[in-house]
Amino acid sequence: MRHEIKKEIINLIEQQTGFKYPIRWVDEKTTRGDFDGRESSIDVFYIPFSEEDEFLTLIEPIRNRIRELIGNRGLFIFHSPEATDKYYSHLFPITKGIIVENGFIKFPEISETEGSTEIIGARINIKYWKAA
């Protein structure tokens, strides 16, 4: 499947679910085992078991479009918050003190120390994409 198609599918799902969960195409480097449908499988991270049905309901309006783009059915592999932290924490680095608020990224208050310049309470409008 072409990169552009994969990107379109991810964008469709992210928009339909309100960017609530990090998603990505299954990666053979970090997902073990071989199975039918691997090439059309998407990891959904930080999703509690109780929200899996809600996720599938949210994407119902775009499922036929996803099927058309993939050429067959898509498979979702859900990872609970606990499993995500345990097995996939390397995919989600933690940056302390940075806040995303109303389309802005706010850095913590820092100062100039030991010859390094740091930002103090800056607000920068940056176009960003959630990616896993």
Image: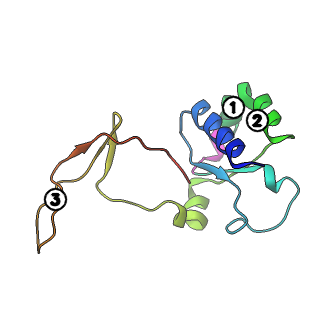
SS at circle 1 = helix
129 to 96, vertically: above or below:
above
- Category of crowding for the residue at label 3, using alpha-carbon neighbours closer than 10 angstroms: few (below 14), some (14–19), many (at least 20): few
Tell me which numbered mark, 3 or 1, is placed earlier along the sequence.
Answer: 1
Q: Residue at x 86, y 60 (%)?
A: 35
Q: Say which quarter of the image contains residue 55.
A: top right
Q: In the shown orientation, is residue 53 left or right of residue 73?
A: left
> Residue 82: which disc?
none
**Residue 64 within the magenta-colored segment of the rendering:** no
What's the magenta region?
A: 46-51
Question: 98 left or right of 89?
Answer: left
**Alpha-carbon span between mark 2 and mark 1:** 9 Å
- Amino acid carrying label 3: it is Ile
The amino acid on which the numbered mark 2 sits, given as a three-letter code, is Ile
Q: Quadrant of residue 111?
A: bottom left
Label 3 sits on residue:
110
Whether 71 is drawn above or below 16: the answer is: below
The mark that comes first in sequence, 2 or 1, is 1
Q: Position of residue 93 (x, y in %)?
A: 45, 62
Does 48 appear in magenta?
yes
The disc labelled 1 sits on which kind of residue?
Ile
Left or right for 104, reference 63: left
The residue to which callout 1 is attached is 59
Q: Are marks 3 and 1 in contact (CB under 8 Å)?
A: no
Q: Residue at coordinates 80% horizontally, 29% vertically from top-left? A: 64
Give the mark nearest the N terminus, 2 or 3: 2
Q: Position of residue 123 (x, y in %)?
A: 23, 43
Image position of 93 with respect to 14: above or below: below
The answer to whether mark 2 and mark 1 are in CB contact below 8 A is yes
Residue drawn at the location 85% of the way across and 52% of the way down = 37
What residue is pinned by disc 2?
A: 66
Counting from the top left corner in percent of width and height, residue 83 is at: 61, 60
